[in-house]
């Protein structure tokens, strides 16, 4: 015990501990068929045979009637912005594990032929060029793998 | 169908006064510091701002090591060997990586701290322990 120190320090140290969190989950059968469709640039929704509500992304049961959904219908890769935002503080992208470059736009998009909205990225991040009701079209990735990320983002149509 | 996802969580924490002094001494002097309790004489390395035995506030840090003795070890498959080391002058054990062949390990083995060549006041400045 040669050295004894009793003064505090004014230099404050921050310890960086980056953590990797990975996980797996079962998609469920509706999402499995939906993803298989994406691989062929096909977007499919599930329709309730009782109330006729068309679900996209597809889900196993109707949220209104609690009926099991079985009827698949085709939906266009074009739709309308129902709500949008521009992010300057990025969320961690669960598909890549990293924050996305900011700013970027996100929207709830009602695709033609669906009654519910899909949460996805926009190609536009200028708030002046975004509005509810704007028409958008999917921009597909070159190499399709059968995942939601096969749609890179939605471009805003003029 | 099984889907996979992963995220990288950018986490950092404030080392605090005692933790900062410990890391600064590692970086600047390759010196290991321990907290000596004025009440019960416990000498903890790594140092704590309070004594974990009697809750007395830490008033001074003392130099310990760089040699010590191994009191326990384990093999973490794929991660290497880890041991509990009581540094000379300390009364509590520190958990760290061992760079010693597994067949040479034994209780009371003398070991010595190895420091990184490039240090940044981070816990990795103390790379591990090797044979004396």
Image (spheres, rainbow, N blue to C red):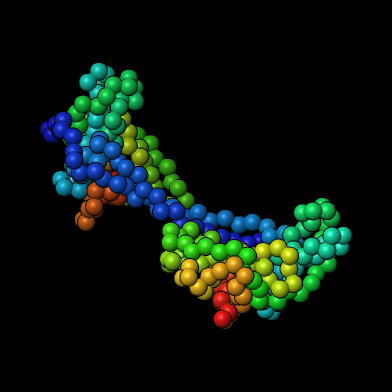
Residue closest to the eye, B89 or A74: A74
Give the x, y percent position of residue A142: 57, 81
Q: Residue at x 77, y 65 (%)?
A: A54
**Tag count in the figure?**
0
The percent coordinates of residue B103 (x first, y second) are: 38, 47
Quarter-of-image position of residue A110: bottom right
Q: Which quadrant of the structure image shows residue B107?
A: top left
Placement of the N terminus of chain A among the 4 image quadrants: top left
The quadrant of the picture occupied by the C terminus of chain A is bottom right
Q: Residue at x 58, y 74 (%)?
A: A154
Compared with A9, B99 (above or below) is below
Seen at 53% across and 70% down, the residue is A130
Relative to A55, say whether B99 is above or below: above
User: Visible in this render: residue B28?
Assistant: yes
Q: Residue at x 83, y 63 (%)?
A: A52
The residue sitting at the right extreme is: A50
Residue A60 at x, y percent in the picture: 77, 58
Viewer-proximal residue, B103 or A149? A149
Say which of B46 and A153 sits in front.
A153
Residue A12, by quadrant, is: top left
Q: Position of residue B25 (x, y in %)?
A: 19, 43
Q: Is residue B104 above or below residue A88?
A: above
Task: Decide: is B97 above or below B94.
Answer: below
Q: Along the horizontal axis of the image, is B111 left or right of B2? A: left
Q: On the picture, is B38 further left or further right than A48?
A: left
Horizontal relation, residue B79 to residue B57: left or right: right
Q: In the image as oriented, which residue stretches furthest toward the left?
A: A2
Residue B106 visible in image: no
């Amino acid at each position: 015990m040669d050295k004894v120190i009793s003064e505090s320090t004014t230099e404050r140290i921050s310890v960086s501990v980056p953590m990797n969190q990975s996980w797996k989950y079962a998609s469920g059968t509706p999402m499995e068929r939906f993803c298989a469709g994406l691989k062929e640039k096909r977007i499919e929704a599930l329709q309730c045979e009782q109330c006729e509500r068309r679900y996209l992304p597809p889900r196993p049961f109707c949220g209104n009637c609690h009926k099991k959904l079985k009827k698949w219908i085709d939906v266009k890769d074009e739709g309308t912005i129902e709500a949008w935002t521009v992010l300057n503080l990025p969320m961690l992208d669960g598909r890549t594990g990293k924050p996305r470059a900011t700013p970027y736009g996100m929207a709830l998009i009602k695709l033609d032929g669906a009654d519910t909205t899909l949460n996805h990225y926009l190609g536009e991040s200028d708030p002046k060029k975004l509005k509810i009701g704007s028409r958008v079209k999917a921009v597909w990735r070159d190499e399709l793998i059968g995942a939601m990320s096969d749609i890179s983002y939605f471009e805003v149509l003029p | 169908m099984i889907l996979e996802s992963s995220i990288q969580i950018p986490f950092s924490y404030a080392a605090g006064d005692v933790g900062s002094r410990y890391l600064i001494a590692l970086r600047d002097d390759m010196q290991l510091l321990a907290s000596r309790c004025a009440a019960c004489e416990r000498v903890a390395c790594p140092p704590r701002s309070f004594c974990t035995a009697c809750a007395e506030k830490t008033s001074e840090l003392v130099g310990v090591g760089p040699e010590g003795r191994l009191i326990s070890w384990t093999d973490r498959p794929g991660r290497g060997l880890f041991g509990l080391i009581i540094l000379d002058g300390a009364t509590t054990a520190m958990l760290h990586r061992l760079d010693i062949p597994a067949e040479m390990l034994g209780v009371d083995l003398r070991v010595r701290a190895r420091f990184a060549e490039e240090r940044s006041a981070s816990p990795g400045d103390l790379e591990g322990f090797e044979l004396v």
